[in-house]
Amino acid sequence: MDLDKTLKSIEEMGDNHIGGNSDTPLRPDAFELSDIEKMELIKKDVANIMHTLGLDMTDDSLKGTPKRVAKMFVQEIFSGLHPDRKPKASTFSNKYKYNEMLVEKNITVYSTCEHHLLPIVGKAHVAYISTGTVIGLSKMNRIVDYYAKRPQVQERLTIQIVKELQKALNSEDVACVIDAKHLCVNSRGIRDIDSSTITSEFGGAFKDPQVRREFLDYIKFDTEF
Ligand SMILES: [Zn+2]
C-alpha cells in the first residue's frame, strides 16, 4: 500500500469509529512497566512530537508540557486502563424488596476517542432491575468513569459499563444509553459542533420494548434542582 492509501484508510477507519469487540485491546505486557516508568517514556515521546512540530522546547511556557501530558495520560485520562483502579462494586441484598427499575441518569462522561485522542464529552444513563442485589448509587458513576478513562470508542464504552454492572449485580437486566459529543467530529474533520452520538446497550429484561420504553421515558425527565 502506498502512503496515500494508508493515510486514507486510517482516516476512514477513524472517522467511522469502527470498534472491535467489547474488550479494550491491551497487550499482555500492558502493565509490566510502572506508572513512573511509563510517565518517563511518554514525557520523552511528547517532547519529541513537539520538537518535530518545530516548537522551541526551551521556551518557558512549553518546557513543562511533556511532563504534564505524561502525568495526565497515565494518572488521569487513561488511568482506567489499569485493572487495579477498577472500583470495587459494593453490592447489598435488596432488603427493601424494591423490584422496579432503578435509573441513574445524567452521569457525566469524560472520555477520549481512541482514533484521534480527542475528548468525548457527554452523559450516560444507566438502569437496572434488581433481582435480589442492589449496588451503591455512586458505584454506577464510578464504573462509568473507570471505563471512560481509557482510549475509547463510544460503542465499546456503553457495552463495558453494562457488562460490568451485569457482573456486579449478577443479573442480565442492565441497560445504558450514552449521548456524547466527539471533539474529533465537532472541532476538526466535518466540524459539526451541533451533532452528538447516541449509543445504547439493552440487556435481559430491557430487550422487552415496554421495559425499554419505560427506561427511555425516565431519562427524558428534565430534572432541575
Ligand atoms: Zn475520533
Image (cartoon, grey):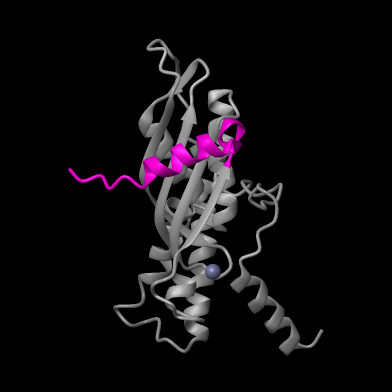
Residue located at (65% from left, 59% from top): 19
Q: Is residue 57 above or below residue 77?
A: below
Residue ranking furthest to the left: 225
Residue range of the region highlighted in magenta in the rendering: 202-225
Q: In the depicted view, which residue is nearer to us: 135 or 97?
A: 97
Residue 208: say if magenta. Answer: yes
**Residue 25 can be seen, yes or no:** yes
Residue ranking furthest to the right: 1
Q: In the depicted view, which residue is nearer to us: 45 or 123?
A: 123
Q: Position of residue 97 (x, y in %)?
A: 42, 12
Q: Position of residue 3 (x, y in %)?
A: 74, 87
Quadrant assignment for ligand 1? bottom right
Q: Position of residue 25 (x, y in %)?
A: 67, 53
Left or right of 223 in this view: 215: right
Residue located at (51% from left, 39% from top): 212
Q: In the depicted view, which residue is nearer to us: 130 or 215?
A: 215
**Residue 88 can be seen, yes or no:** no
Residue located at (69% from left, 83% from top): 8
Q: Main secondary structure of the magenta part?
A: helix
Quadrant holding the C terminus? top left
Q: Position of residue 181 (x, y in %)?
A: 43, 64
